[in-house]
Amino acid sequence: MRASLIALVIFVVTAGIVLAGRPVTQEERTRLVAALAAEGCSGGKMFMFEDPVYEVDEAACKDGKKYDFEFDASFKVTKKSLVQ
C-alpha cells in the first residue's frame, strides 16, 4: 500500500511539471514581450506549454484587466482570455 501511495505521489508531481510546461528562453521572452506590447499588455508568467504553443498568464493590459494569452510559433496571438 505504501509503495502504491509513493508511486501515486511521484506520478502527480511529474504530471504537474509536464502540464506546467517549460520556462521560456531569453529570446522567446523578448519576442513574447514585444507581442504583448503590440496587444497593449505587459508582464505575466511566461512559459512554453506545448511545442510550439507559448502561454502568458495574467498579463496586465491597458484596459485595466488581466488576460491569459496563447501564442503560436510565430508569436501571433491564438487565444486571449479574460482572467476572472
Image (tube, helix red, strand yellow):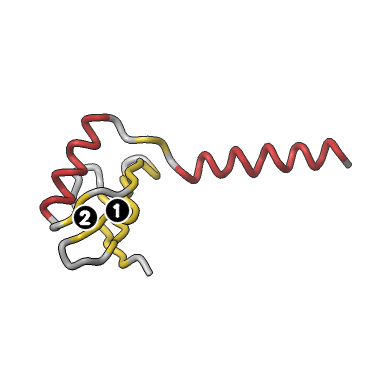
Assign the C terminus to one quadrant of the image.
bottom left
What residue sits right under mark 2 in the picture? 77
Label 1: element kind: strand
Distance from Cα at disc 2 to Cα at disc 1: 6 Å
Q: Are marks 2 and 1 in contact (CB under 8 Å)?
A: yes
Residue at x 28%, y 62% (from the top left corner): 66
Q: Where is residue 83 in the image (x, y as percent from the top left)?
A: 35, 65
Q: Is residue 42 left or right of residue 81?
A: left
Residue at x 14%, y 57% (from the top left corner): 39
Above or below: residue 26 compared with residue 33: above
Residue at x 31%, y 45% (from the top left corner): 54
| Most foreground residue, 1 or 78 | 1
Using a 10 Å C-alpha cutoff, classify the residue at mark 1 as few (fewer than 14 neighbours), some (14 to 19) or many (20 or more). Answer: many
Which residue type carries mark 1?
Answer: Glu
Q: In this view, does 71 lie to the left or right of 21?
A: left
Residue at x 66%, y 40% (from the top left corner): 11
What residue sits right under mark 1 in the picture? 70
Which residue type carries mark 2?
Answer: Val
Q: Quadrant of residue 5?
A: top right
